[in-house]
Amino acid sequence: MYLNIDAVIAKEVYKKPSKRSTILERVYVLDPAINTKYVVAYRNRETGLALLGIRGTDPSKPRDLITDLRMGIGQDLTKMKRFTDVEKEYYKFLNKYPHRNRIVGHSLGSNITQELARKDKYNIGMTDYVLFNKAHTPYMRNELENEYIKAYRIEKDPVSILTTKGRTIKARRDDDTLLDRHGVEQFIGRGRY
């Protein structure tokens, strides 16, 4: 069965760094130097493609919930510690893998991914950005989407429901809970987007 590696890495980053898989799909190898609570990097040993996964909201982490709340009331994500912590790892990743790379995020991780793409506009073209179920919040300027930035959302996902850009994918089952619809698992095993 084909697994969408972007979604697999977006799910993998939710695990504790010590619990993450060292190899995914037999060819993506973990980079232990870029493996923190917020990000994880894998490199395809056959093609050289490097992927950076950015973790979204972990509901058991008060700091993540506070970040979501602050975004929800209109504060700028790029001014928050959660963003600046990830941004440091992002530039570390780009310095190590300047070509053939992709950044993926889910939920809050997608919002961070989009803001990194916006902030680092000179890197667009060498880096692709993939957003899963990105929240629409009052602070958002314009949503980005072009040939290098791809956004996907699950139909009736409560977090990304106001997002206007990107491709909407039908939920696996009509009786999925709202939390199920928001989960990155919805994108795994769906083939190529």
Image: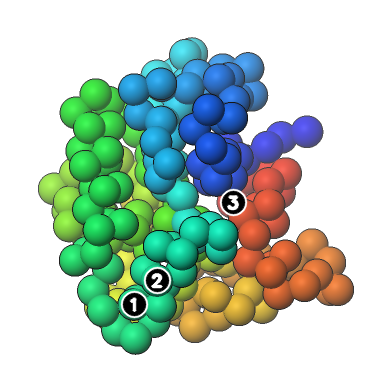
Q: Is residue 149 left or right of residue 178?
A: left
Query: Which is in the foreground here, disc 2 or disc 3?
Result: 2
Q: Amino acid at mark 1?
A: Arg
Distance between the Cα atoms at labels 1 and 2? 6 Å
Give the quarter of the image for residue 181. Answer: bottom right
Q: Position of residue 135 (x, y in %)?
A: 46, 72
Instruction: Report the disc number at residue 66.
Output: 2
Instruction: Report the disc number at residue 176.
Output: none
Q: Are marks 1 and 3 in contact (CB under 8 Å)?
A: no
Could you tell me which residue is drawn at 41 percent across and 21 percent down? 31
Question: On the image, numbered disc 1 is attached to which residue?
Answer: 70
Count neighbours of disc 2 (C-alpha within 10 A) and say few if under 14, some if 14 to 19, many if 20 or more.
few
Could you tell me which residue is drawn at 43 percent across and 41 percent down? 37
Q: Amino acid at mark 2?
A: Ile
Query: Which is in the foreground here, disc 1 or disc 3?
Result: 1
Q: Are marks 1 and 2 in contact (CB under 8 Å)?
A: yes
Give the structural element (helix, strand or loop) at label 2. helix
Could you tell me which residue is drawn at 53 percent across and 37 percent down? 16
Give the structural element (helix, strand or loop) at label 3. loop
For the residue pair 133 and 89, the one nearer the viewer reads as 89
Instruction: Report the disc number at residue 193.
Output: 3
Name of the residue lying farthest toward the top: 46
Q: Position of residue 58 (x, y in %)?
A: 53, 57
Inspect this view and state whether residue 155 appears: no
Q: Amino acid at mark 3?
A: Tyr
